[in-house]
Each structure stands twice: as structure tokens, then as C-alpha cells.
Image (cartoon, grey):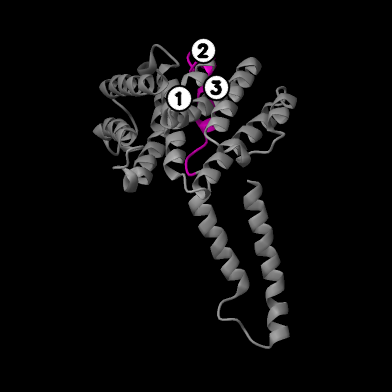
Amino acid sequence: MKRTYQLVSLALLAGFLSPVFQSCTGKSPKKDTAEVAEEAIKKEIEEYTYPLPSTFEVTNMLNSIEASFIVGISNDPEKAESYFEEKAKALNLGIYTADLAYATTYNQKSEVQAYFTSCENLIRELDFTSAFDENLPDEIDANLDNKEKLVEIVTGMFQNAYSYLNKQGRTELSYLVLTGSVVEGLYLTTHISENTFQNPKIIEAIIFQKEALVDMEKMMEPLKDSEMLKDVYKDIQSINAIYALEEGSTAMTETQVLKLTETVSNIRAAYVQ
């Protein structure tokens, strides 16, 4: 987010300097300086801005229907130390970011601290701590009673991680983190109640996540044969295939919901094991 603000400031500066430049040289450049700066910003935003709806949009939907916070539904934060392969670390970083959003939305302070610590450990092991302000842990602790500020901080953390990894050429890793977050969001939604199909608001939350999963498949398609992503790409495809059973519909059949719940549960179980 800070990066985007800096770029916007540069664009404004370029806009102010453009007429000065022209008057000094007496010549009009082939392409307006401000226009060039604007195009650079657009490219930066397209390539590096977090491309999916925030996990908070999902967890807020669950909170708004007064679904209770379920202790133990999220991945055990202590398991963060048990992931040794880079792929498993990245997927579970995504899962823990969704769990962090879930805990933050429900104002579960101890869980917020535990999941932030899990995220912090995996970020360190994946070697991109420089993507974050060194004061981030202190900011989290200082705002445990300020939900609005905490949401802002955690959202910025998601966005910075995605942006940094892509700028470093670690696109596959960023897609794994995104996948973990999306899968966990859908897992929480489909397991928040024992009577999912009977609750139209939960079905609405499930349908809301469809677009993000379709976008994930499109984003990953050019890299679908890579060793790191090929299995995960197939997982996303299998979820989207269930959504597509009622293509164009604003509702879901009970068969779809049950099949989606089972599929997501199996995928997630393989990620967190």
C-alpha cells in the first residue's frame, strides 16, 4: 500500500514538472511525462497488487450472519514448525493468513497473536521478511483492542507479501500462498455450520468465493505444468468443476454443496497434514 502511495506521488510530481520541462526546452516530448508515469503505475498495479478479494470479505460475511467463532476449526498454529518443504510452507502461510483474518474478524485476541506468530515464522523461513516493516509485531500487539486498525494492518500484510514475491520473481510461491488462503476461506465457510445447505446466507458466502477461484485458475494456467504448481492447479480445477455444475445460476444444489464440502476438506487436509 505504501508503495502504491509513493507511485501516485511520483505521478503527481511528474505532472507538475511536465509543463516546466517543456517551457525550458522549448520542445514538446514525444510522450507526455505524466502519461508515461501513469502507464508505469498501471503496469505496477496490474502486476503486483493483490488480485483477489480480501479474506476479510469472506470472514465478515460469516460474522454478519452471526455464525459463532469455532475454536479448533482453523489450522493448529503450532504446526507451522512442522512444515519443511517450501511448497508446504507457502500453502500453509496462505492458510494461516486466512485463519488470522478469521480470528481478527471475531476479535479473538489470543488466536490473533498465535496466528500472526505462525505467519511470521513461515515468512522468515521463506526468506521474505524484508517485505514487512520490522515494527509489524509491535503494531499487532498495540492494536489488539482496535479491530478496525488490526484489519488494516493485516490486509496490508497480505498485499505486501503478494507484491514482494512477484517483484522478486517468485510468482509460483505467491500463487501457493494465494491458493492456501482461498482454500482455507472456503473451508471455513463450508464448515462453519452443520447445516450449511439450509442456511441461504452461507450459500451466498460460498457463491461469493466462486469468482476468486475462477480467477486463480486463470492466473495459474500459464504455469500449470510447473513442478511446484501442477497439483495445486488441479485442486483449483476440481473445485471450479463443482461450481460449474450449475453454471450461470445464483444458487447451488444440495449435491453441489455436499460435494464441494468434501472436496475442499480433502484438499485442505492434504495441505495441512
Query: Any magenta on residue 11?
Result: no
Residue 65 seen in this snapshot: no
Q: Position of residue 81 (x, y in %)?
A: 52, 20
Label located before the other in sequence (2 or 3): 3
Residue 84: numbered disc:
1
Q: Position of residue 137 (x, y in %)?
A: 69, 28
Q: How many marks?
A: 3
Which one is closest to the eye, mark 1 or mark 2? 1
Residue 113: numbered disc:
none
Which one is closest to the eye, mark 1 or mark 3? 1
The one of 240 and 10 positioned closer to us in this rendering:
10
> How many residues crowd around disc 2 within 10 Å: few (fewer than 14), some, or many (20 or more)?
some
Query: Any magenta on residue 57?
Result: yes
Left or right placement of residue 95 versus residue 196 in this view: right
Disc 3 designates what residue? 63
Name which residue type carries label 2: Ile
Left or right placement of residue 246 versus residue 161 in this view: left
> How many residues crowd around disc 3 within 10 Å: few (fewer than 14), some, or many (20 or more)?
some
Q: Position of residue 233 (x, y in %)?
A: 32, 37
Residue at 56% across, 23% down: 118
Q: Which residues are magenta?
A: 51-77
Which one is closest to the eye, mark 2 or mark 3? 2
**Quadrant showing the C terminus:** top left
Name which residue type carries label 3: Asn
Disc 2 designates what residue? 70
